[in-house]
Image (cartoon, grey):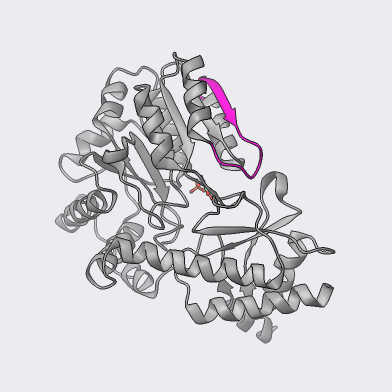
Amino acid sequence: MYLLMVIHLQLKLFTVGPVACYPQVLEEMGRQMFSHRSKDYIDLHKDLTFLLKEFLETEGEIFFFPSSGTGFMEASVRNCVERKMLICVNGSFGERYVEVARANGKEVVVLETKLGEPTMPDVLDDYLRRNPDVEAVAITHNETSIGLINPLEKLASVVKSHGKLLFVDAVSSMGGVDIKVDKWGIDVCFTSSQKCFGIPPGLAVASVSAEALKKSANMRNKGWYFDFILYKKYNERFSTPTTPPIPQMLGLRRILKIIRDEWGGKYKYFELYRERNRIIREGVEKIGLTLFPKRGFESPTVSCINAPKGMSGDEVYEAMRARGFELAHGYGKVKDVTFRIGNMGYIEFKDIHEMLKNLEEVVKSKG
Ligand code: PLP
C-alpha cells in the first residue's frame, strides 16, 4: 500500500492535460486569497492582460473565463454566429466544435479530412467559395486526439480572403507554438490553463477581436454568462462579471513573467517544446514505432503513436503507468490502436530519456 502511494506520488506526467505544473506556479497558487474586487486583483488582471497581449501579439481584448477551454467554443458560437458557420474537423475536438454549434441551434458546414490528415488551404478555399453564406470558420489548431497540427497561418489567410470571422481552438497549441493573432487575423483564439502553460485546470483565456465584438453587440439570444460585451465592459476596469479563478491567474502571471524575464522570451519557450518533442519523436521511431498523423504535420506538443504489434494502446499506457510514467490513452476513433505522449508543462529532459528507456523495454517485452 505504502509502495503504491509512493509510486503514485512520483508518477512522471507525459499527459495531454491536465499536465504537470511548474513548481513556481504551484508555489504562487498557494498564496492567500484576495477579493476579486480588490486592488490586488485589478493589478493581476491588468498584468495578465498585458502579458498575454504581448505573447499573442494582439491589440484585441483578453478575456478570462472561469471555465475550461470549451467555454470559449460555446462563447464564439453564441456571440458571433447568427445562423451558419463552417467547421474544419480533423478529429475529436473538431467534432466537439460541431456538436457545440449544433447544440446552440446553428447550421454547420463540416469540412472533414481523412483521419490523420490536416486541413489544406486549397480545400478550405473551395469550401468557402461554395458556401459564401457562412459567417465564421472554426479551426482546431492542434488536434490533440491524433497529435496533428494544422497549417494555421495559411488557413487563416484563406479565411480572411473570404472576409469571414475566424475562431481558433488553440487549447493544446497556445504557449507551445507561436500564434500571431492580429497579423493572421484571428477573431477568437482560446486555450485552457491545463495545457502548454503548465497551470492547473479551471481557467480559460482568449483573445477577442474588434470584429468579433461588433458581431456580438448585435447578437440576440447569446446568454449572459459568456457574453463578450459584458466581459468587455468589465475589462475596462480590469475586472470580470463573476468570480474569476484567481489562483490559476496568479500561476499564469508567474509563468508568463518567467518565460519573458528568465527563460529568454516566448521563442525560447517554443524552442524548448520543439526540443522535447524532437527527442520523443526520434526516440519512439528508434524503438521501431510510428507516428499516427501524416508526416510533416505532427504536433509539437502531443505525439500520437501507433501501438506496437501485439499490444493495444491501453496496454502500453498501463505498462508505462506501472513503471511510474503517466502517458495518455488513445482518443476517439483511434482510441484502441494508438497511445499518446504529451510534452506540455513541467517536464525535465532526464525524465524524457528515462521514459523512452522504459517504453523500449515495454515494447520489447512483447516483441
Ligand atoms: N480542444 C482541444 C484541441 C483539446 O485538446 C481539448 C482538451 O483536451 C479541448 C478542446 C477541450 O478543452 P477543455 O477540456 O479545457 O474544455
Determine whether, in the image, residue 258 is placed left or right of residue 333.
left
**Is residue 215 at all visible to an observer of this figure?**
yes
151 vs 14: above or below: above
Classified by dominant secondary structure, the portion drawn in magenta counts as: loop
Residue drawn at x 53%, y 28% is 123
Task: Indicate left or right for 337 with 133 as reference.
Answer: right
Taking the magenta stretch, the answer to whether it contains residue 111 is yes
Residue 288, picture quadrant: bottom right
Residue 100 appears in the picture as rendered: no
Q: Nearer the viewer, residue 263 or 258?
A: 263
Q: Which residues are magenta?
A: 104-119
- For the C terminus, the image quarter is bottom right
Q: Quadrant of the N terminus?
A: bottom right
Residue 225 among those drawn in magenta: no
Instruction: Judge by depth and name the residue closer to the eye, 4 or 19.
Output: 19
Counting labels gives 0
Q: Nearer the viewer, residue 21 or 333?
A: 333
> Residue shown at 16%/39% (left/top)?
236
| Residue sitting at x 38%, y 71% | 26
* Residue 96, position as x, y percentages in the image: 57, 36
The relative height of residue 155 versus residue 102 in the rendered view (above or below) is below
- Could you tell me which residue is drawn at 71 percent across and 56 percent down? 338
**Residue 20, horizontal then vertical, whole percent:** 48, 68
Q: Residue furthest bottom?
A: 3
Q: What x and y, as percent, mark residue 297?
A: 54, 50
Residue 202 at x, y = what percent?
43, 53
